[in-house]
Amino acid sequence: MTARRGDLLDPSCPTRQLLDRIGSKWVSMLFLALGAEDEVRFAELRRRAPGISSKVLADTLRVLERDGFVSRRVEPTVPPAVHYGLTPLGRSLAAPLAVLRDWAETHMADVDDARSAYDTRAPVGTPKSML
Amino acid sequence: MTARRGDLLDPSCPTRQLLDRIGSKWVSMLFLALGAEDEVRFAELRRRAPGISSKVLADTLRVLERDGFVSRRVEPTVPPAVHYGLTPLGRSLAAPLAVLRDWAETHMADVDDARSAYDTRAPVGTPKSML
DNA sequence: TGACCAGGTCACCACAGGTTACCGCCGAGG
DNA sequence: CCTCGGCGGTAACCTGTGGTGACCTGGTCA
């Protein structure tokens, strides 16, 4: 069972689990790419996520399917056509993601400013990546 | 400059950058631990985040300070006392995080169910971690 | 002959995060 | 007196794994 409300200090806390998932590199992109239409095919997703390799796309889709966010429908034609879409669960994540996007769009410039201010203030020993 | 609205496909998209930051392992915990009071000291944070090492705590706090989420105040007593707190920017993230937490608390059980259903359906070749 | 489809497989690496040890300084306890 | 622990970290080192790129299949369409 997942932890109780506000129990963000517990590693099994639902919020942390959720962040682990949607924080993965391509997940937010795929949510956008899948949310646009009802169903998208594999190669189309590749095109919409420039830079992704087919391996990572396949892996990510499988994880998302496993978690119930994404549906996978194989048409038994030859060659098989595979259609991906968002499940109701996946679509229900759109609202929280939109809130996050709004915050990011209004405030990320401040973060950039803070970051460059910090870097000019202390040009030595700056934490390089560790995002 | 960060990318335009909805441009989730751009790697410099603000939403992705935000997710990179708050998706980091201890960040959500620290936001909770710091949000409770005005200021918290280093050792107190260590106690509130069970399992974190002082190195990782220091690293994470520095990144958060660099991004303008966390303030750091050193009292020049001897030995110096260091107080950490949330900046206004950091506090403004509380709302989006709360939305995320609400979603997680109501829906993560579904995710767990989907996951175990998937695993019993296809016990072989299951994607193990790759979160 | 080639390209597209939906991936699978192998090899590789960068790095976030963990571990352990250590520092100077202090006050409390025996 | 000496030692022990708390404070706020730093330095060195190691590992797991998410991500990458290159190459493979096997069929169909043009």
Image: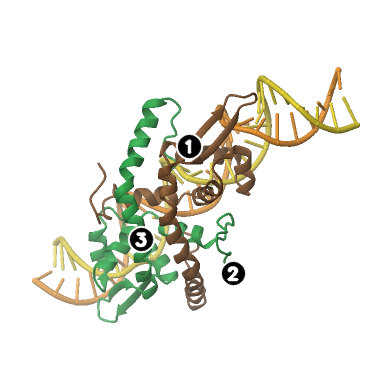
Chain colours: A green, B brown, C yellow, D orange
Front position in the image: C29 or A125: C29
Is residue B20 placed above or below D8 in the rendered structure? Answer: below
Q: Which quadrant is home to the C terminus of chain A?
A: top left
> Does residue B91 sit above or below B54 in this rendering?
below
Q: Position of residue B50 (x, y in %)?
A: 63, 49
Find disc 1 in the rendering and name its residue. Answer: B71
The residue under label 1 is which amino acid type? Ser
Q: Residue A64 in the image: state x and y as whole percent.
A: 40, 66
Residue on which the image places disc 3: A97
Say left or right for A37 vs B107: left
Q: Nearer the viewer, mark 1 or mark 3?
A: 1
- Mark 3 neighbour density, 10 Å: few (under 14) some (14–19) many (20 or more): some
Amino acid type at circle 2 is: Met
Mark 1: few/some/many CA within 10 Å (<14, 14-19, 20+): some
Q: Which residue is mark 2?
A: A1
- Residue at 25% over, 41% down: B1
Residue shown at the point (47%, 70%) measured from the top left: B107
